[in-house]
Image (cartoon, helix red, strand yellow):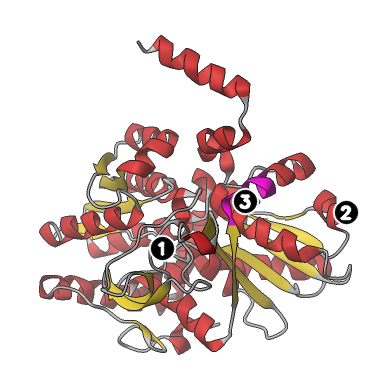
Amino acid sequence: MSQDKECNDRGYYGEFGGSFIPEILVATFDELKRHFREIKDDPAFWQTYSDLMSNYSCRPTPLTFAENLTRHFGGAKIYIKREDLNHTGAHKLNNVMGQGLLVKRMGKTRVIAETGAGQHGVATATMAAKFGFECTIYMGEVDVKRQRPNVFWMEQMGATVVSVTDGTRILKDAINEAFRDWVTNMDNTHYVLGTACGPHPFPEMVSFFQSIIGKEARQQILKLEGKLPTRVFACVGGGSNAMGLFQGFPDKSVECVGVEAAGHGLHTGQHASRLCSPDATVGVAQGYKTYFLQNDDGQMRETHSIAAGLDYIGVSPILSKMHQKGEARFESATDQEVIDAVKLTMRQEGIIPALESAHAFAGAFREAAELSSDDIIIINQSGRGDKDIFTVADAFGDPKWRDFIKEKALDYK
């Protein structure tokens, strides 16, 4: 799908999107939109970006045939798009390096970002170290605790990590703090928003840089199989990795499936599902219009997901439009289904998906057996699971891991 054709000048995708920002930021957004339009119309910029991603970030990432999982389910051939092998271990660097080049073009010297699972924060700290920018990362206190390894690496690369203690202390609160910083420091600072949400032009811009995933996957599957897949699966938090994959397959013959976080179950209210849950309604928050998990008074609900990167209260306006128009299908996976998918993938393929990515695996595993051996599915592994070792080890109930943690705690006393 071409975002140029889908997005109007005000950043709307159907009824979703827009730019609801304070007056003080209007000039900053106008500058950003102008520079973004210039690079989109400049073939040399995309070539510079592609070259950078090739020699710095190991692109193209492989499309791996999951032979053992295919045999296990006995249905469609399963391929995995290995964004976990991208530098910093996730798809996030695709967007971040693109925005970094844009920051250099605008002549700014400082970057800020929000992060949930920590992968976007690590990617932003990496980009800042590479380009010589000052860097501040906002992260909810809850996420700081469950993603400590990523916090460590951000700080070692020179970033200042700010633990956000307001609200529910997760991703949405980190975004709020990042916007407050930007209003105060907009002359020298660019906000490297990490997903395809927020005010225009961020949904379009993030999708533009992440489209490299789908472009590669399309070329790879045609080379390997000589035909397009039947279905492609991606997890959906804000929506950047899903948009990255889906843009490579605008064909009506390919079904795009996004998998949200069902948490403890949609019936419990303890989840983060916006597009396949009655708990979400259309509203305006954090600068744009989309589906949000909110109550009747417009107050944001608390969310839950075992994956730190999927517990956001909103979703990309582009995906909301696709949902409304039937251009993509959205499902959800519970925490337990996700843990089961991680365990199965590790045992069958020796691959450790991030908890976020494992939602897509869980959704694909439910459907693989119903398809024939002539069908092909692609799962986007948006990140690697080593960052989740504390959460996964706890979910597995591994006694050796618990003994190790106790021993390390004693060492620090």
Q: Is residue 130 magenta?
A: no
Q: Residue at x 27, y 67 (%)?
A: 299
Foreground of the two, 361 or 10: 361
Circle nearer the N terminus (3, 2)? 2
Left of 169 or right of it: where is 1? right
* Residue to which mark 1 is pinned: 195
Circle 3 packing at 10 Å, graded few (<14), some (14-19), many (20+), is: many
Q: In which quadrant will I find the N terminus? A: bottom right
Residue 98: % across, % down:
41, 61
Q: Is residue 335 magenta?
A: yes
Left of 159 or right of it: where is 50? right
Q: Quadrant of residue 205?
A: bottom left
Residue 183 visible? The answer is: yes
Give the Cα distance between marks 3 and 2: 20 Å
Residue 10: % across, % down:
30, 86
Circle nearer the N terminus (1, 3)? 1
For marks 1 and 2, give the one nearer the viewer: 2
Q: Is residue 157 above or below residue 238?
A: above
Q: In which quadrant will I find the C terminus? A: top left
Q: Residue at x 66, y 65 (%)?
A: 217
* Residue to which mark 3 is pinned: 338
Q: Which residues are magenta?
A: 334-342
